[in-house]
Image (spheres, helix red, strand yellow):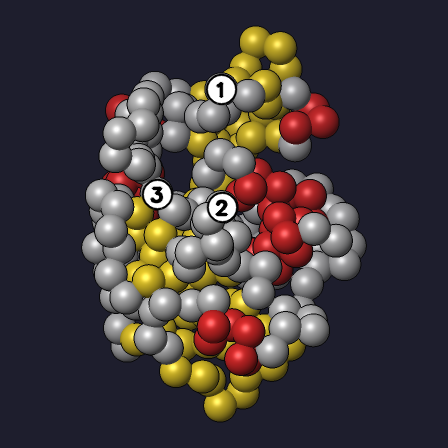
């Protein structure tokens, strides 16, 4: 199991039957592949969909917010961006799962740009992080240069302040509790010492610190 699959499987366990969920582009889109068979969620896309179908049911004339072909389930709806963002800003999205460039110990997120690199725009990330009831960041623990992506203070431009609820990496699961970063779980075979060495942010260890469970069944939306 590679790092991205492990992360996606763990995030899948955080979703509950009936949730309205927005999945960011990249790694988060894999989460629906590992939902337990008894969990059915409604996918929302900020370009104007509610009730997206799995990628295997993609329609050639429909694309999601990442520009990839998608489908729509019976009973789903399509609408304009104004209505879509009214849903998001109105707090009607239960969970937003996004990738991250950096998360710091104050629950701040940077995930929309790297200075000096061309970016098409911030997309809906700022609205999703601010408007969703719960924000889960699914990202690899370290950057390509080996540096930690969990920091004392984000150095990249922020997407939002104090809005991250949980961070899932291939090494560990962290949650923010009363404004503090708490280490809740470790990946199988990963020690606390390894996590500490690869994490710049200050954190406490939960009393019930345990091995990370992962979804084992492949399901569908």
Q: Out of 130 and 202, give the one closest to the viewer.
A: 202
Q: Nearer the viewer, mark 1 or mark 2?
A: 2
Distance between the Cα atoms at labels 1 and 2? 25 Å
Which residue in the rendered view is the most extreme toward the top? 61
Element carrying mark 2: loop
In the image, what residue occupies the spot 65% across and 32% down? Answer: 54
Q: Out of 85 and 78, give the one closest to the viewer.
A: 85
Left or right: residue 179 versus residue 79 is left
Query: Residue 199's image quarter?
Result: bottom left
Left or right: residue 54 versus residue 200 is right
Q: Which residue is mark 3?
A: 111
Element carrying mark 1: loop
Q: What is the crowding at mark 1: few (fewer than 14 residues within 10 Å), some, or many (at least 20)?
A: few
Query: Residue 162's image quarter?
Result: bottom left
Q: Nearer the viewer, mark 1 or mark 3?
A: 3
Distance between the Cα atoms at labels 3 and 2? 15 Å
The quarter of the image holding the C terminus is top right
Q: Which mark is residue 67?
A: 1
In the image, what residue occupies the spot 21% across and 55% down? Answer: 161
In the image, what residue occupies the spot 69% across and 71% down? Answer: 188
Which residue in the rendered view is the most extreme toward the bottom? 207
Q: Are marks 1 and 2 in contact (CB under 8 Å)?
A: no
Query: Residue 59's image quarter?
Result: top right
Q: Are marks 3 and 2 in contact (CB under 8 Å)?
A: no
In the image, what residue occupies the spot 57% across and 65% down? Answer: 171
Q: Which mark is residue 144?
A: 2
Looking at the picture, does residue 98 appear above or below residue 204? above
Chain-order first, disc 1 or disc 2: 1
Left or right: residue 112 versus residue 206 is left
Percent x, y of residue 117: 31, 27
Q: Out of 21 and 149, give the one closest to the viewer.
A: 149
């Amino acid at each position: 199991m590679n790092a991205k699959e492990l992360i996606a499987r763990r995030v899948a366990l955080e979703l509950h039957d009936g949730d309205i969920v927005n999945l960011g582009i990249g790694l988060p889109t894999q989460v629906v592949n590992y939902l337990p068979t008894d969990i059915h969620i409604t996918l929302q896309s900020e370009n104007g969909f509610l009730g997206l179908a799995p990628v295997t049911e993609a329609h050639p004339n429909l694309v999601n917010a990442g520009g990839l072909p998608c489908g729509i389930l019976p009973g789903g709806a399509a609408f304009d961006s104004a209505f879509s963002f009214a849903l998001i800003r109105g707090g009607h999205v239960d969970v937003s799962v996004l990738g991250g460039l950096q998360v710091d110990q104050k629950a701040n997120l940077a995930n929309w740009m790297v200075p000096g690199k061309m970016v098409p725009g911030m997309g809906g990330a700022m609205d999703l992080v601010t408007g969703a009831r719960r924000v889960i960041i699914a990202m690899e623990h370290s950057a390509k240069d080996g540096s930690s992506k969990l920091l004392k203070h984000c150095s990249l431009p922020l997407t939002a302040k104090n809005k991250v609820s949980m961070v899932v990496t291939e090494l560990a699961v962290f949650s923010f509790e009363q404004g503090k970063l708490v280490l809740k779980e470790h990946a199988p075979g990963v020690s606390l010492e390894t996590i500490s060495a690869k994490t710049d942010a200050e954190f406490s260890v939960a009393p019930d610190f345990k091995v990370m469970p992962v979804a084992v069944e492949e399901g569908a939306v």
